[in-house]
Image (tube, rainbow, N blue to C red):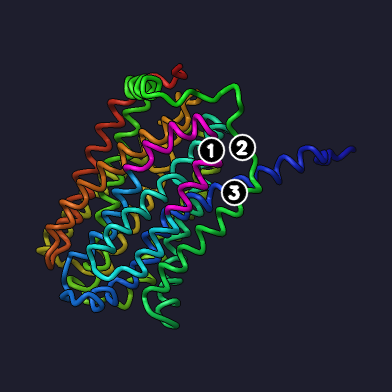
Amino acid sequence: MSVSTPTPTSQRSRHGERGLIAFLGALAGLSAMGIDVVLPGLSDIRVAYDLPEDSTRLSLIVTIYLFGLGTGQIFYGPLADRFGRKPAVTAGLGLFALGAVGSALAPSVTVMVICRFVMGLGAASPRAMSLTIARDRFSGDAMTRVVSLVMLFFQLSPAVAPLLGEGLLAIGPWQGIFVFAAGIAVAIALWTTTVAETLTDDRRLPLTFARTAQSGRTILASRWALGHGLVLMFEFTAFYVYLSSSELIFDDVFDREHLFAVCFALGAVIQAAVNLGMSRLAPRYGTARLIGGVVGSYVVLGGVFFAVTVRADGHPNFWVWLALLWLLNALHALVLTMANSLAMQPLAALAGTGSGLIGTMSMMGAAIMSSLVAATIDGSATPMAAAYLGFGTLAGLSLWWARGGSPVAVR
């Protein structure tokens, strides 16, 4: 009986794939870390700028970062299709580090908000390029498997980053959080120099307004790509309400601010675990088949979350509220992975522009809508629950509409 052993070539291939996934995970994780590592320091920042304890003004440093993260992607996409993925990544990492240092030195909330926007613009590149590079190398359910593994880093960043933030606050002032973020960006920029470029010369596109506009029209004309992009936008909106307001709700509604970092981290670990499961399920059952059940479950659970919160007049039992929130965010993680993969499926020839356009549409729309919801949170958890139900329902309708399109590649 003979036993087959992996050839050196296949071993190198697997090793190369693992290295690429780790690099893409670092890119995706950086955009999340730009939010999560800052959250434990919000109370200290309020004190530094003489803001009331229940002030929602600091939610701007989260939402404006997300706004920059959304708007920036549309510019990096065409640049990456012309000059390559690596130059686009490096430029974004430089902006991220610059904005982080500026945030640490900001003399006022207004200046910090501006610097956080610059950080978001910088984070837009690694966020868009992680999907673009994945699409360069993979397609279909194989891409979903890879994106699921990449998202492990994206979800583990929220698990680790708040704890890192707490640790940095224990040994120094809140400014150290931003200096740390800048250092991580520099380290990833050095890593980028060791990674092979995935855009070949024959696939480079001219950087002209006419070409970019035509590419945009082509992408938006794909009902499949646009529909799954709308799923992303509405899913992101509910999750952004959570990101920008959860610290305030823990403190102002439940008086459990001391549990915030741990609970936030545990929720992120749950998201990472379900994405690991998705990396195994997608090749077996198919991404397009699985996403319908996940989105449907999200809507039903969102209805339960809303009913429990409203029945308690915006002050439900903390542990019931937290358990439902963890489950909803776990389902969100699955939708995020699958919708990204499905939206990019027909866009192989326009991977950079497609990733940038869909990323800008979904994240900028979510940042605007979530900021409107976050502004209504005042001593009650009801607005957040309404966001999960309402935007989850809109995501379900968008998925139903996308199913009328075709995943055939566009030119």
> Does residue 40 appear anywhere in the picture?
yes
Tell me what residue is drawn at x 33 percent, y 21 percent.
217
User: Magenta segment: does it hold 75?
Assistant: yes
Does residue 209 appear to the left or right of 83 in the view shown? left
In the picture, residue 316 is in which quadrant? Answer: bottom left
In the rendered image, residue 301, in percent from the top left (x then y), is placed at: 27, 49
Q: Secondary structure at mark 3?
A: helix
Q: Nearer the viewer, residue 237 or 105?
A: 105
Tell me what residue is drawn at x 60 percent, y 54 percent.
190
For marks 3 and 1, the one nearer the N-term is: 1
The magenta segment:
71-95
Disc 2: which residue: 197
Does residue 142 appear to the left or right of 321 in the view shown? right
Tell me what residue is drawn at x 38 percent, y 37 percent.
75
Q: Are marks 2 and 1 in contact (CB under 8 Å)?
A: yes
Does residue 251 appear to the left or right of 89 in the view shown? left
Tag 2: Cα neighbours inside 10 Å, few (<14), some, or many (≥20)? few
Does residue 87 appear to the left or right of 1 in the view shown? left
Q: Nearer the viewer, residue 339 or 27?
A: 27
Q: Is residue 93 above or below residue 133?
A: below
Tag 1: Cα neighbours inside 10 Å, few (<14), some, or many (≥20)? many
Q: CA distance from mark 2 to mark 3?
A: 9 Å
Tell me what residue is drawn at x 76 percent, y 43 percent.
11
In the rendered image, residue 29, in percent from the top left (x then y), is placed at: 47, 54
Q: Secondary structure at mark 1?
A: helix
Residue furthest to the right = 1
Q: CA distance from mark 3 to mark 1?
A: 10 Å
Disc 3: which residue: 192
Q: CA distance from mark 2 to mark 1?
A: 6 Å
Quarter placement of the C terminus: top left
Q: Is residue 397 above or below residue 323?
A: above
For marks 2 and 1, the one nearer the N-term is: 1
